[in-house]
Amino acid sequence: MQERIVIVGGGAGGLELATMLGRKLGRKKKAKITLIDRNSTHLWKPLLHEVASGALDSRLAELDYRGQSAREGFQFLVGTLEAVNKDEKSIQLAAITDEQGHEVLAPRSIQYDRLILAIGSVTADFGTPGVSDHCYFLDSLRQADEFHEHLLNEFLRVNQSIEDGENTKLSLAIVGGGATGVELAAELIHSVSLLSIYGLSFLDQKHFEVRLVEAGKRLLPALPERLSAS
Ligand SMILES: Cc1cc2nc3c(=O)[nH]c(=O)nc-3n(C[C@H](O)[C@H](O)[C@H](O)COP(=O)(O)OP(=O)(O)OC[C@H]3O[C@@H](n4cnc5c(N)ncnc54)[C@H](O)[C@@H]3O)c2cc1C
């Protein structure tokens, strides 16, 4: 029987691994490679700030796991990992439900010979009170989309109140002055400069304030000082 190699998580690591193993072993039937992810498509995470600001339509940059698996010799299953049973060498996937909560697929159990967990990480809030309740995080496409939706509504609201003669400002704080925070700030400022093209002609850069919060001595602490200064 072919060895069953199961990879959970189709992010930067898991997708690359499934593709390489698919080419090397899966196509030659030397092993059965299965990739599992809770989403059907992959988006390269460093693009999330562009989705959040509206600079990128994620549908243009997503990679469909099923298409990739058919090309590269691995199997793809959509599902969310819930439990690992090391003794039985099996993993448990949660039930899949539709938007109305109706069950599409019942919980499933998948057997493996080798298991690779590549489920990534999430932003740490270091237990700071209020953060998990009141902040947006940029760890997934869903979160980037939610932020973008909220931003568009805020643009509409503030544009209308300025048109109505109120002295309103839209202000936004970004926590973390690394590459993502700095790029997001720049993209947001840029997106406001384009609003008039889309009919929101009252909200401009003087009514928009972005604060970038960084604990270190300078922005972009991992990069040369010349870049931080710039
Ligand atoms: C906004 C942002 C910008 C970044 N910019 C850069 C950059 O410019 N350069 C750089 O080198 N790195 C950057 N990074 C870091 C880089 O994206 C990560 O280091 C990399 O994605 C980690 O790869 P991974 O495969 O370990 O996890 P991830 O890419 O996070 O993938 C994890 C996968 O597991 C899936 N998953 C999670 N839980 C489950 C579960 N229970 N069941 C099934 N599937 C699950 C997820 O859907 C996801 O597809 C950035 C990260 C972020 C968030």
Image (spheres, rainbow, N blue to C red):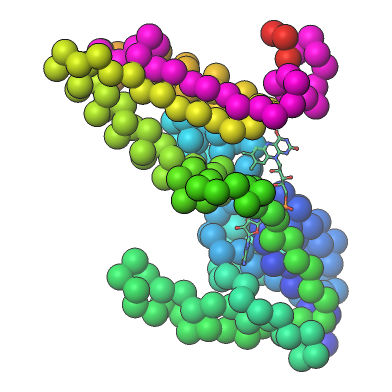
Q: Quadrant of the image for the N terminus?
A: bottom right
Q: Residue at x 34, y 77 (%)?
A: 102
When the figure is inspected, residue 93 is found, relative to residue 7, above or below; the finding is: below
Pick out the residue farthest to the bottom.
Answer: 88
When the figure is inspected, residue 27 is found, relative to residue 157, above or below; the finding is: below
Residue 19 location in percent, x, y?
75, 56
Residue bounds of the magenta highlight: 202-227
Q: Residue at x 31, y 26 (%)?
A: 155
Total marks in image: 0
Pick out the residue farthest to the left.
Answer: 164
Left or right: residue 175 compared with residue 91: left
Left or right: residue 225 compared with residue 98: right
Reply yes or no: does residue 206 show up in magenta. yes
Residue 18 location in percent, x, y?
75, 60
219 or 156: nearer the viewer: 219
Q: Quadrant of the image for the C terminus?
A: top right
Left or right: residue 3 compared with residue 165: right
Left or right: residue 63 compared with residue 102: right
Q: Residue at x 48, y 84 (%)?
A: 106
Residue 83 location in percent, x, y?
66, 79
When the figure is inspected, residue 20 is found, relative to residue 109, above or below; the finding is: above
Reply yes or no: does residue 123 show up in magenta. no
Q: Residue at x 34, y 66 (%)?
A: 99
Q: Residue 87, can we see it?
A: yes
Residue 109 location in percent, x, y?
63, 85
Pick out the residue farthest to the front.
Answer: 129
Q: Residue 194, can we see it?
A: no
User: Can you tell which quarter of the image residue 157 is in?
Assistant: top left
